[in-house]
Image: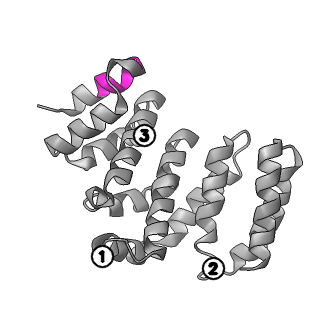
């Protein structure tokens, strides 16, 4: 039987002991409540937190419907994410949800949760990572992309993002400079 203790052992073992794809399939096949995986996302040990979020992302991309029982909790805890690697996975999941919503392909249960959620929690979580010194580029980029989904409802974001993008651009890598340039142009047309 698949237990939280088993998952903790796998998440702390060398990555090759069991592939994350195998672990993802085991969780799905065992019908493990994803609330237990969410609990591990907030584990104090970074490796457990990161790897459990990585598996959660894989589950979401396999079939977004699996998230229905825990999606509300994920959104309500978005500003409590405690490390940028964990945030990156949550950001990717949320961007996938926004993408599905834009294509009218988001299941109604998830759409209802998203529509009833408090976007300020998500916005706060995104700004937390954007403004964190030495935050990994991927976490910053995904956070900005999420904020762009809220510009219509929160017009002040359109005014706040350009100076933040300029600040990020100052000491950034060539790839991030290119992203910032394209993003600045996109924001002008929103």
Q: Position of residue 135 (x, y in %)?
A: 68, 42
Q: Are marks 3 and 1 in contact (CB under 8 Å)?
A: no
Q: Sort mark 1 into few (<14), some (14-19) or many (20+) by Cα contacts within 10 Å.
A: few
Quarter of the image with the N terminus is: top left
Please tell me whether mark 2 or mark 3 is closer to you in this view. Answer: 3
Q: What is the chief secondary structure element of the magenta stretch?
A: helix
- Residue 134 against residue 147 in the figure, above or below: above
Residue, x 79% and y 77% (percent of image)?
188
Residue assigned mark 1: 108
Using the rendered view, name the quadrant where residue 49 is placed.
top left
Residue assigned mark 2: 154
Q: Earlier in the sequence, mark 3 or mark 1?
A: 3
- Residue 117 against residue 179 in the figure, above or below: below
CA–CA distance between discs 2 and 3?
30 Å
Please tell me whether mark 1 or mark 2 is closer to you in this view. Answer: 1
Q: Is residue 46 left or right of residue 73?
A: right
Residue assigned mark 3: 54
Q: Magenta segment, which residues? A: 8-14
Decide which of 183, 84 is in the foreground and name it: 183
Secondary structure, mark 1, is: helix
Quarter of the image with the C terminus is: bottom right
């Amino acid at each position: 039987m698949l237990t939280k203790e088993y998952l903790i052992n796998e998440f702390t073992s060398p990555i090759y002991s069991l592939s994350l794809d195998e672990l993802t399939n085991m969780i799905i096949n065992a019908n493990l409540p994803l609330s237990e995986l969410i609990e591990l996302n907030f584990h104090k040990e970074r490796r457990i937190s990161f790897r459990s979020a990585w598996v959660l992302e894989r589950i979401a991309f396999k079939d977004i419907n699996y998230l229905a029982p825990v999606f509300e909790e994920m959104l309500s805890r978005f500003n409590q994410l405690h490390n940028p690697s964990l945030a990156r996975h949550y950001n990717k999941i949320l961007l996938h949800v926004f993408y599905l919503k834009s294509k009218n392909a988001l299941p109604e249960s998830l759409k209802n949760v998203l529509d009833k959620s408090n976007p300020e929690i998500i916005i706060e979580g995104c700004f937390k990572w954007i403004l964190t010194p030495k935050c990994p580029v991927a976490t910053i980029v995904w956070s900005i992309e999420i904020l762009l989904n809220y510009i219509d409802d929160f017009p002040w974001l359109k005014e706040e993002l350009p100076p933040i993008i300029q600040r990020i651009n100052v000491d950034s890598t060539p790839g991030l400079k290119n992203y910032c340039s394209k993003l600045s142009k996109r924001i002008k047309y929103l």
